[in-house]
Image (tube, rainbow, N blue to C red):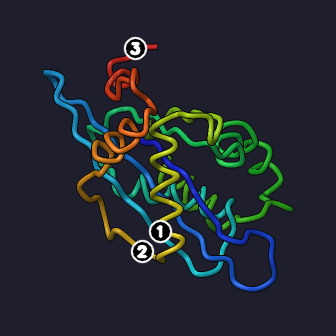
Amino acid sequence: MVHADEACLGNGRDGANPGGAGGLVETAAVGGAITRHDFFLAEPDTTNNRMAIRSAIAALELVGARADQPPITFVSDSEYLVKGISLWMPAWRRRDFRNVKNVDLWQELLDLEAGRDITWRWVRGHAAHPKNEYADHLATRAARDQAVSDGLVESGFEAWLGAQRAKGKYLDYDPDGDLRGDP
């Protein structure tokens, strides 16, 4: 499972708009062990929409293209990304991507998606969904610092969640529930 988010500081203003994307990659092994890794990337002048697509590209590149690739659930608060890849793409292809922005990134994402079992799921942003909030934290920090993880790195999710709980947030949240299929 991948939880990803994007950030663009000053989106729509004149001048450069630094952006970032970040994600939490979780895998559940046979026997129930869960591993978590993070990734984050940045661009000096971009848009939220471009960074949303870049978050998906980065995640699929980092997860790899193994023949035994398990199904992936990709969770994002970007309606542009989720609807674009799962609803609008057939019409865009029929029209040869006429009047579609970010064609270069959409085509790169399509190449990476080919042959994979991916479920694209939208969640409302900034609605107290801990993993989306954590991905937002990664993306915003990457945009601000123009930081890049250069691959999957050890996750800071548990420490972040602990700090949030110390503030009284997410006290009843089970971070492993969605990986077990709990509602």
Q: Residue at x 46, y 33 (%)?
A: 169
Q: Amino acid at mark 3?
A: Asp
> Marks 2 and 1: CB-CB under 8 Å?
yes
Left or right of 42: which side holds 81?
Answer: right
**Circle number at residue 83:** none
Residue highlighted by disc 3: 182
Which residue is drawn at the image coordinates 32% and 70% (left, top)? 150
* Local SS, label 2: loop
Which of these two is toward me, 67 or 102? Answer: 102
**First-in-chain label (1 vs 3):** 1
Query: Where is residue 11 drawn, in percent x and y?
Result: 74, 68
Q: Earlier in the sequence, mark 2 or mark 1?
A: 1
Residue 164: x percent and y percent? Answer: 40, 41
> Where does the image place residue 75, in percent across and percent down from the top left?
52, 38
Residue depicted at x 31% and y 64%: 151
Rendered view: 172 above or below 64: above
- Relative to 134, does residue 140 appear above or below in the rendering? below
Which quadrant holds the N terminus? top left
Q: Amino acid at mark 2?
A: Ala
Q: In the current view of this chain or complex, which residue is farthest to the bottom?
A: 15
Distance CA(mark 3)–CA(mark 2): 34 Å
Tell me the residue that label 1 is attached to: 142
